[in-house]
Amino acid sequence: MKRLEDPRLLRGRGRYLDDVVLPRLLAVAFVRSPHAHAGLAAIEASAARAMPGVAAVITAAELRGLVRPLAPRLAGPGFTPSAWPALAERAVQFCGEAVAAVVADSPYAAADACEGVRVEYEPRPAVTDIDGALAAERVVFRRAYRHGDVDAVFAAAPIQLRERFTHGRCVAAPLEPRGVLADWDGETLTVWSSTQIPSALRSTLAASLGLQETHVRVIAPDVGGGFGLKTHVFPEELAVAALARLVGRPVKWIETRREQLLAGAHAREQRMDVEVAADPSGLVRGLRARVVADAGAYHIYPLTAALEPLGSAAILPGPYRAEVYEYEAVAVRTNKPPLGAYRGVGMTMGAFVMERVLDLLAERLALDPAEVRRRNFIPREAYPFVSASGLTYDSGDFPKALEQALALADYDALRREQAQARAAGRLLGIGVACYTEYTGMGSDVFRRRGMHDVRGVESATVTMEPDGGVRCATSFPSQGQGHATTIAQVIADRLGVALERVRLAPADTAVAPAGSGTFGSRGAVSIGGTVAVAADQVRARLQVLAGHLLEAGVEDVVLEGERAYVRGLPDRAVAIAELARLAYSPPCGGLPAALGPGLSATVYFDPPGPTFSGAVHVAVVEVDPATGRVRVARYVVVEDCGPVVNPTIVEGQVHGAVAQGLGEALQETLAYDEDGQLLTGTLMDYALPKADDVPAFEIGHLETPSPIMPGGVKGMGEGGTIGAPAAVANAVADAVRAHGVRITALPIRPETLRAVSSQG
Ligand code: MCN
């Protein structure tokens, strides 16, 4: 089934943030620090205020007492809080931090006036890397974990490996950048934001500005991609909301691409030192890991800097049986933008390290990489399985997924082809990666992590209108995942109406009940827990009404093909639209006893998860010995997200996520110099994958239903980005093994492969 939302979007009829225009609208631009670390001695804005079209120039001084900074909480020891202000007050902590906002009658006038704001900085030394931050003891998060007698297992292990892996800084880079429009009518603050979390944003704005939530309305119009970036609340959202109140007119800020690269949330940067204890058979018995993430200048709101290192450490054991494990997860503060969520957060690094380690082990023991995985997998019958890091894996069948992927790739033939290519001097590599992924998390997961400001609950209202059309409003909006289609499928199925009769309401806190948002691959699971249950409640009311009219037992009423009929008697029927009309306009004699008017249900759901989905990826790459450039020749995925609601959407999600993973593996780097200056501030320098960098994908499915989630459904929207860097890294390592090049860092840029190039 094709996506219902696409015709409107493909015809250019989408309504993105920059399409939203209000009367008397003013534009906002931010003055941003050119220094990574500096004191703010003075800001002189009178010249800018006098420039044409300028309505106001606002600094932290004008916002004092009006806006509380973003200060997420994390329960438990080892957490040093931070407060990210709407505008910097006494000092700037990273290059690109906002120090003033200009409000003008056009974005151009606002941008020009930014140049007229004179800021006197007092540059200070910047800390720009993990070692510098550790040396300066700038630790903002530290958590340790130990399971089993790790020392005894390591002391007895005949095979030991030790390696350091690093991951560079990258960014989500959605097609539509961030943006926010705010309007204050003296009573209600209405905010349009390109966000993944309208409900949580409303709460944060209300708390920060000292308003009641009922006086704040957040609307997320069409959102052109989020990929985790828009899971956060940003200072710009606070500043723009406050500006609307200060200037008494609607104001809008649209991020430029340069601002996004410079001052949005970044992703991934971390390193992991790992030790492995194994048997000569290749069985991994124990793991030790120390993860240190470069968290940037502030904790990201609401997830905190714990998100990346804790996720990487917790998922490291993957779908394998390691018995003992100890880790330390650390985040350090540097003078760079905060580290936040990006598709696959935490899990990408965990999978990269574990899958590289298994290949190194295979190499040491002269085993095939597929064989070493077979020997370590958790067998299907061992699920539910508690991993060495304490995660309860509810379901999975990796032995089967691996065999399916190897068959799809024709692995044996690939190895023969590789041998021939090698004989001819070509650098062909084959990489296998397997990962398990936590999806569909509920409040319990966030509370266990100590994350107070992430609710974990979702909700939906399903309403059949008086003409039989159905409207659904959810707390988890779409940024491209196709929810309008999958939600319509679920509702149409349950209420017996045509798909076209079902509409997903725009994301608007005035319409939708409260919840958390779309992140952590929780959408499919939340649809099952909210939309499906609410639709069932509406269905039950329709059945009572139809049973009453048709003089049949409720359990005998079938809803199908826009009609309600008595089972076995298809002619004894009434149109569902007629039932809807009667529900709002009761017939003479009224509705059946105990059935009030209306056809609507609101359901809140706290997913009992996480539920674990997973996949096996096989990448085939060829390295050009002359340039070190890597071409991805083939890409195979076998994924398991339980029963698939919409195969087209699921495959589309795999395509997009793998494409992002390939960029992460081979191209994308936010490079900084030692002063904390960003060297890759445009898309000419920050290399996103393009169409010709991405191969055709070969996708297979496996369905291992979740025993804990409604309908057995598991999430999958992030998976491709988790598997691709690991599979590609293993494939490149396989291609260049004979040349003595070690693959321990992402991205694997041509310059990493220069040892091959020089030999080539
Ligand atoms: N689905 C399905 N059957 C399943 C599982 C999922 O049909 N068994 C469908 C779902 O109904 C939904 C889609 O696949 O339409 C993704 O579902 P899910 O894995 O639950 O993920 P979410 O809906 O929670 O989406 C979030 C996820 C994340 S965390 C990021 S980041 C991401 C992603 O989705 N950002 C995206 N995919 C994206 N796709 C686009 N186009 N844009 C983004 O910003």
Image (tube, rainbow, N blue to C red):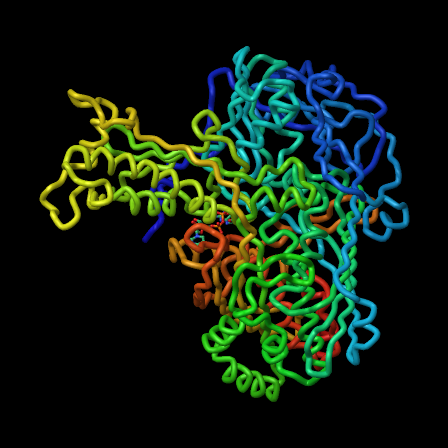
Q: Which residue is at 51% across, 80% downward?
A: 411
Q: Position of residue 572 (x, y in %)?
A: 11, 42
Pick the residue in front: 98 or 603: 603
Q: Residue furthest left?
A: 571
Residue 661 visible (yes or no)? no
The residue closer to the viewer here, 338 or 503, is 503
Q: Locate residue 313: give its quadrant.
A: bottom right
Which residue is more in the foreground, 392 or 456?
Answer: 392
Camera-nearest residue between 131 and 94: 131
**Outermost residue to the top:** 186
Q: Quadrant of residue 705?
A: bottom left
Indicate the quadrant where residue 415 lies: bottom right
Toward the right, the furthest residue is: 135
> Is residue 590 positioned above or below 727 on the image?
above
| x, y percent for residue 135 | 90, 50
Figure check: 190 above or below 672: above
From the top left corner, tell me how far across and down residue 454 is, in percent: 62, 38
Going 9% across and 44% down the picture, which residue do you hit? 571
Q: Reply above or below: 669 against 432.
A: above
Place of residue 636 in the rendered image (x, y in percent of width and height, measured from the top left): 49, 69
